[in-house]
Image: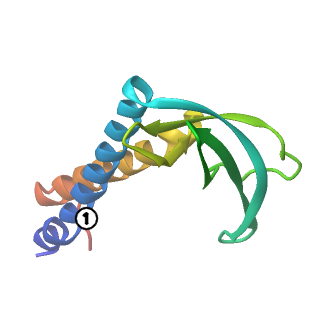
C-alpha cells in the first residue's frame, strides 16, 4: 500500500521537478549559444527574505540598441557593496527585456537542483515500488 502511494504521490511531482529543471537548463544553454549579450551594471540591490536571513538581489541595468532594461537577479544572495560592478547579461534576441545575468551560478544552479531533486524522487519512488526501500 505504502509503495503504491509513494509511486502515485511522489513520482509525478519528481517528474515535474525534473522536467522544469531540464526546460530551464535548455533555455539557458540556448541563451549561451544563440542569445545576445549586453554589458550590464549593478545599480542597486533589492532586499528579500530567506528562511533565516535577509538576502540581497542585484538590480542590473543594461542596454540593447536604443532601449534600456532593468532586471533583478543573483541567486547567490549578493553581498553589500557590489554596486557599480560590471556583469554580462544574456537575452533572447526577440525578447531583450527578459535578460538573465550570465554568471554560471545564475544560469545553472537552480536547473541542476531541480533535475537532481526530480531524479532523487523518481529513484525513491521506484525503490519503494520494487520493495528495496520499505516504510513501517
State left or right for residue 21 relative to residue 73.
Answer: left
Answer with the quarter of the image where residue 26 lies: top left
At which x and y percent is residue 87?
Answer: 69, 35
At which x and y percent is residue 135?
Answer: 26, 69
Task: Pick whichever, 53 or 37, lies toward us.
Answer: 37
Task: Pick whichever, 78 or 116, lies toward us.
Answer: 78
* Residue at the extreme front: 66
State left or right for residue 69 relative to residue 48.
Answer: left
At which x and y percent is residue 114?
Answer: 38, 51
| Above or below, 88 relative to 136 | above
Residue displayed at 19% across by 68% down: 6
Residue displayed at 72% across by 71% down: 52
| Above or below, 69 relative to 101 | below
| Above or below, 34 relative to 46 | above
Does residue 88 show up? yes
Residue displayed at 23% across by 53% down: 122
Residue displayed at 73% across by 64% down: 46
| Above or below, 130 relative to 115 | below
Answer with the quarter of the image where residue 65 lies: top right
Residue bearing mark 1: 13
Does residue 132 show up? no
State left or right for residue 75 relative to residue 107.
Answer: right
Task: Pick whichever, 98 or 25, lies toward us.
Answer: 98
Amino acid at each position: 500500500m505504502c509503495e503504491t502511494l509513494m509511486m502515485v504521490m511522489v513520482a509525478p511531482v519528481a517528474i515535474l521537478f525534473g522536467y522544469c529543471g531540464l526546460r530551464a537548463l535548455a533555455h539557458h544553454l540556448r541563451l549561451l549559444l544563440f542569445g545576445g549579450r549586453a554589458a550590464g551594471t549593478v545599480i542597486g540591490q533589492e532586499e528579500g527574505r530567506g528562511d533565516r536571513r535577509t538576502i540581497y538581489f542585484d538590480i542590473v541595468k543594461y542596454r540593447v540598441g536604443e532601449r534600456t532594461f532593468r532586471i533583478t537577479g543573483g541567486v547567490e544572495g549578493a553581498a553589500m557593496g557590489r554596486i557599480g560592478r560590471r556583469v554580462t547579461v544574456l537575452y533572447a534576441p526577440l525578447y531583450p527585456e527578459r535578460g538573465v545575468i550570465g554568471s554560471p551560478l545564475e544560469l545553472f544552479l537552480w536547473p541542476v537542483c531541480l533535475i537532481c531533486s526530480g531524479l532523487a524522487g523518481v529513484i525513491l519512488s521506484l525503490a519503494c515500488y520494487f520493495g528495496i526501500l520499505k516504510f513501517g
